[in-house]
Amino acid sequence: MSICIYYVCVYSSLSSLSLLFAFFSSISSSFSSLLLFVSLSVSLSLSLLLSVSVCLSLALSFSQYYNTSISYHRVIMRKMLHRCVELSVRHILKSFTNHIKSHASKKLQRKLFPDTALFEKWGDNLTNAQQIQAFILFSLYGYNAYLSDHLPFNRSIPDTRPLRCLEKKYPQQLPTLSVVITFMDEALSILQRAITSIIHRTPSHLLKELILVDDFSSNEDLKVNLDKQIQLYNLKYPGLLKLIRHTERKGVASTRFSGSQAATADVVIFLDAHIEVNIEWAEPILARIREDHTVIVSPIIDNILFDTLEVNESPLMPMGFSWKLFGHYDYMSVNSKDNTIAIKSPAIMGIFAANRLFLEKIGFLDTGMLFYGGENVELSLKAWQCGGKIEILPCSRIAHLQRAHKPYSLIISPLMKRNALRVAEIWMDNYKYMVYLAWNLPLKNHGIDFGEVSSKIELRKKLKCKSFDWYLKNIYPNLMPLQHIVGYGSMKNSVNKMICLDQGNIQGNTPVMYICNGFKQQFVYYHLTGELYVGQLHAEIFSNDRCLTDPGEGWKPELVSCQEAILKRMNMYWDFKQGASITNKYTNRCLEVSKRSPVSHLLILQRCTGQKWTIQHTVRNWEI
């Protein structure tokens, strides 16, 4: 028996070491599979050795206990040994197999695309083939279409409404609703989930029709397969779904216009395809428009994460826009006592609803806007200036999938610029120059064709719409025009015309000279009174526009928040004329360039040596 105990002790020690070795090797590199096999083999061998030892010991004990004859003892011992080893081997092999299966199920797959945003928080257990498929779909759509294809269409999402919204009661008699979904090359499962959520979470007596407008998609799934799905929906909900297909790509405004022309309900709402409506989303919208047919409303748009497709709650904030006419959340005051009250907003979001007849009266959307960009701002200005209003409704929630990248982003910037100029020409009166400044374009001869606008200007006169000045003062005071800008664009020095004044590291406050690239970091704005703004110009309250200052000592110029520079009375005013020096009005030091090497130049403050500067665009004849 002592021999048995010895073997048990040896086995236990070595087997434990072997299994530890297996564990650590299993979490290392791809070499781990070989190490795991070796370690488990050692463990198996030790197990067999112990089993034979135990069986032999038992057989010997049996023969000694019964004191049988030698021949009979051998027979019995052989049978016992054979049976004991057989059972032991079966048990050990079963344990070995289970361990291998357990290890395989727990092993994390190596990520093939570790630097891709899709796989930062998702995809640990995907096989290589699944990762490749998910990556391809992500590249096509900018969101996790692979995961979408594996989620139910009628999935539950969190109710993100403020608690007090649950207590609200809405009238039984509400306007009917036409839902317009516009899309272009969307993943079919994403579109189906949007349709399903609308049907399941909208009272059937309110939902008159669901109109899909395809802006000339090339995705094959959105052709025959979509047609089949619509037929299936209409078998269950007769006549509910309608499909309009464009034969050429027309853009967001024209696609929504096509949907609005097909709508027949009292109220029409425009949605993207990558959305999911939440519980009781429609009733707040319809109730508010029933109260006031001139109000255009947006829900609170929650965020669907592009990778995990989880829904995150968005804050209660109005919508604004920059001078480039890019939409963004705005830090205007919101009623903190009642978080269910409608929020007055300078602009609409990408999802909005309106009385169909009022929308027709003010001219629907401008179909002269091409592809994408600026259409929300155009309708916002039209609504406010022509007798309407815009509100955000906290009790209406729609989740919107924010792409990690837009598949069409490479061609979008020139069109957004063109659309912005069109909006400025029609609606912004004498303030349109701010849009030109923001896009770094000359006020005249910019060479951009923004289309025919005379009919839109005539409609504005016919409706007796208010001025943009009224809009700024009464609706959007946070947007601050900078008057008396006399020069703007890139700024070059006579030492080297290939380099431009640059804001430098955004986290720092030291401007530099850098190879001219035309990016916003090199935009410079010179004011009539001497301020030099360097970097992107926001011209909004709460923005951090920065001005060039002379600290008064040392050789480094500094960029400081313009508001801070004014409050602290810093040396922020400069004398400059086109083709002349830049001289600080208080220190009399000049902004100049020091050539450290053939490829390196330093921006410095020093006694003037006659260096000359030029700015890209001038507004007047420098009569300062």
Image (cartoon, grey):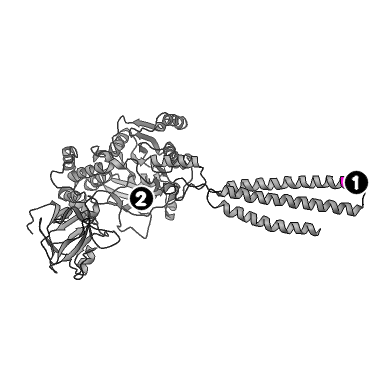
CA distance for labels 2 and 1: 94 Å
Secondary structure, magenta segment, majority class: helix
Q: At x 78% / y 56%, what residue is drawn?
A: 4
Instruction: Identify the residue position indicated by label 2 in the image.
Output: 393
- Magenta stretch, residue numbers: 70-75
Q: Residue 406, position in %: x, y?
A: 34, 43
* Quarter of the figure with residue 250: top left
Q: Is residue 71 magenta?
A: yes
Mark 1 is on which residue type?
Tyr
* Quarter of the figure with residue 259: top left
Which mark is first along the chain, 1 or 2?
1
Residue 119 visible in the current orientation: yes
Counting every numbered tag in the picture gives: 2
User: Does the CB distance between marks 2 and 1 fall below 8 Å?
Assistant: no
Viewer-proximal residue, 584 or 205? 584
Instruction: Identify the residue position indicated by label 1 in the image.
Output: 72
Circle 2: element type: strand
